[in-house]
């Protein structure tokens, strides 16, 4: 018997543990956005080389790839709340290290890349744990609502964080890293305050069979496989975030505040859609709408790459954020609802590697291509690639395309 999603717009917040989780995630995401803007702009100021902007993404992605067989099993076997708290603590230490390099005037590529590797290790463990923790804090009927609010939390941070990061960096990099460090610490305190939730842990002894269970489930469930791989290839090709310092300084002639505004624009579009989805959840044609969202993301990427006017670039980025929010909402709902809790950590570990590949590795692709052929061609080619992926996946995964609603499947 399927479980119908709650129609209450604030259903997830009726549970105090989720409310704390929500604000903790918001503060952590806010801090990450401030650090991301600050590191990118500071690196481009120091080196003037777009390739280093791509390497920022690569060094954060590699740990997720190398640890994929470990992180999901850890999230399934141990207290997910504790894992998230420890990871936030490590993230705070990394932020403090960046602050230290700035204070001592020692900011240079390779020490920063070393810190980003540790950041990547922390995020590799936190991703599966934080994604798997939310379903333990709310009933299944409230999960789609929780996912929508989770997305709105991230997108709000994606709006305010880059703008705050740009403004703070304009004051001084020290101010930016100091505020980010405070938010990381506050997020950790909130997570620690959550009572230990019920969690169906993996009971079998660790073996290759149990470690690979997440991969086996994904490849056996075509809906989950199609949803995860769609995001991987679409954002891998269409990502333009790493090149925003180039567009802000060299193409649109904007300063650090302008970079913050560009980084915030996708979040503005996504937040509008996230709030609408929380109030008016998708009831029909969910799979088709996900593919439409990916296609619009590609179109927005092309417009952004070709634009030389600030307002048009911002509008294109807002379209990218709004359309990406539709696909994220459907994808995350499907993954959570179609995955049994006992393998959710391992499935989310694979998903986080795919998400990391689509974001950080996509940044490396963009930075490398920009170094070779220029920033504008790198972005435009990627946008057309995303459009092609949407069409190919819609044809190749008909079951995913035909999914109508986001209710839990009857056999879960």
Image (spheres, grey):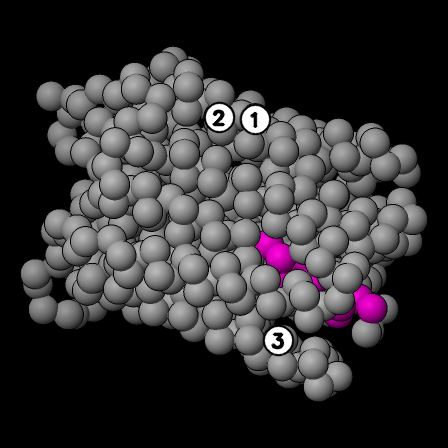
* Earlier residue among tags 3 and 1: 3
* Coordinates of residue 294 in the picture (x, y in percent): 57, 31
Instruction: Give the left or right position of residue 196, taking residue 83 as reference.
Output: left
Viewer-side residue, 170 vs 108: 170
* Earlier residue among tags 2 and 3: 3
Instruction: Tell me the magenta residue range.
Output: 33-45
Q: Main secondary structure of the magenta part?
A: helix
Instruction: Give the left or right position of residue 81, taking residue 226 as reference.
Output: left
- Separation (CA) of disc 2 from disc 3: 34 Å
Quarter of the picture holding the C terminus: top left
Which residue is most to the top? 284
- Separation (CA) of disc 3 from disc 1: 33 Å
Quickly name the residue at label 2: 275
Q: Is residue 179 visible?
A: yes
Disc number for residue 272: 1
* Coordinates of residue 299 in the picture (x, y in percent): 70, 29
Location of residue 48 (image quadrant): bottom right
Quickly name the residue at label 3: 98
Q: Is residue 142 above or below residue 21?
A: above
Q: Residues within 10 Å of mark 3 (few under 14, many from 20)?
A: many
Circles 2 and 1, Cβ within 8 Å, touching? The answer is: yes
Q: Is residue 392 visible?
A: no
Q: Is residue 221 above or below residue 406?
A: below
Location of residue 322 (image quadrant): top right
Instruction: Give the left or right position of residue 219, taking residue 152 as reference.
Output: left
Query: Is 35 inside the magenta-drawn segment?
Result: yes
Q: Residue at x 41, y 24 (%)?
A: 278
Quarter of the picture holding the N terminus: top left
Q: Residue at x 63, y 33 (%)?
A: 268
């Amino acid at each position: 018997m399927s479980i119908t999603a709650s129609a209450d717009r604030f259903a997830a917040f009726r549970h105090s543990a989720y409310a704390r989780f929500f604000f903790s995630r918001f503060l952590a995401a806010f801090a990450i956005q401030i650090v991301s803007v600050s590191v990118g702009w500071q690196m481009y100021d120091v080196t003037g080389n777009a390739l280093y902007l791509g390497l920022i993404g690569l060094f954060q992605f590699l740990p997720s790839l190398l640890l994929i067989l470990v992180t999901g099993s850890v999230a399934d076997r141990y207290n997910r709340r504790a894992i998230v708290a420890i990871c936030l603590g490590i993230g705070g230490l990394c932020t403090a290290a960046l602050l230290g390099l700035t204070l001592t005037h020692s900011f240079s590529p390779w020490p920063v890349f070393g810190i980003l590797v540790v950041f990547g290790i922390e995020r590799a463990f936190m991703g599966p744990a934080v994604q798997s923790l939310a379903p333990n804090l709310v009933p299944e009927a409230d999960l789609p609502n929780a996912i929508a609010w989770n997305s709105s939390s991230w997108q709000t941070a994606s709006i305010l964080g880059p703008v705050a990061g740009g403004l703070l960096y304009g004051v001084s990099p020290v101010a930016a890293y100091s505020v980010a460090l405070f938010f990381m610490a506050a997020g950790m305190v909130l997570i620690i305050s959550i009572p230990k939730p019920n969690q169906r842990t993996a009971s079998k002894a660790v073996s290759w069979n149990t470690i690979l269970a997440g991969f086996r489930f994904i490849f056996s469930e075509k809906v989950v496989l199609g949803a995860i791989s769609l995001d991987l290839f679409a954002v891998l090709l269409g990502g333009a975030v790493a090149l925003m310092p180039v567009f802000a300084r060299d193409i649109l002639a904007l300063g650090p505040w302008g970079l913050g505004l560009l980084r915030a624009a996708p979040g503005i579009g996504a937040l509008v859609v996230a709030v609408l989805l929380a109030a008016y959840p998708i009831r029909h044609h969910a799979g088709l709408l996900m593919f439409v969202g990916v296609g619009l993301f590609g179109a927005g990427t092309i417009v952004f790459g070709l634009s030389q006017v600030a307002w048009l670039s911002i509008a294109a980025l807002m379209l990218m954020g709004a359309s990406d929010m539709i696909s994220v909402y459907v994808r995350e709902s499907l993954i959570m609802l179609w995955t049994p809790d006992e393998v959710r950590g391992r499935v989310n570990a694979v998903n986080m590697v795919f998400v990391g590949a689509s974001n950080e590795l996509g940044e490396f692709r963009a930075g490398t291509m920009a170094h070779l052929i220029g920033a504008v061609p790198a972005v435009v080619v990627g946008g057309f690639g995303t459009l092609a992926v949407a069409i190919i996946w819609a044809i190749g995964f008909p079951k995913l395309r035909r999914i109508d609603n986001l209710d839990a499947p009857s056999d879960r």
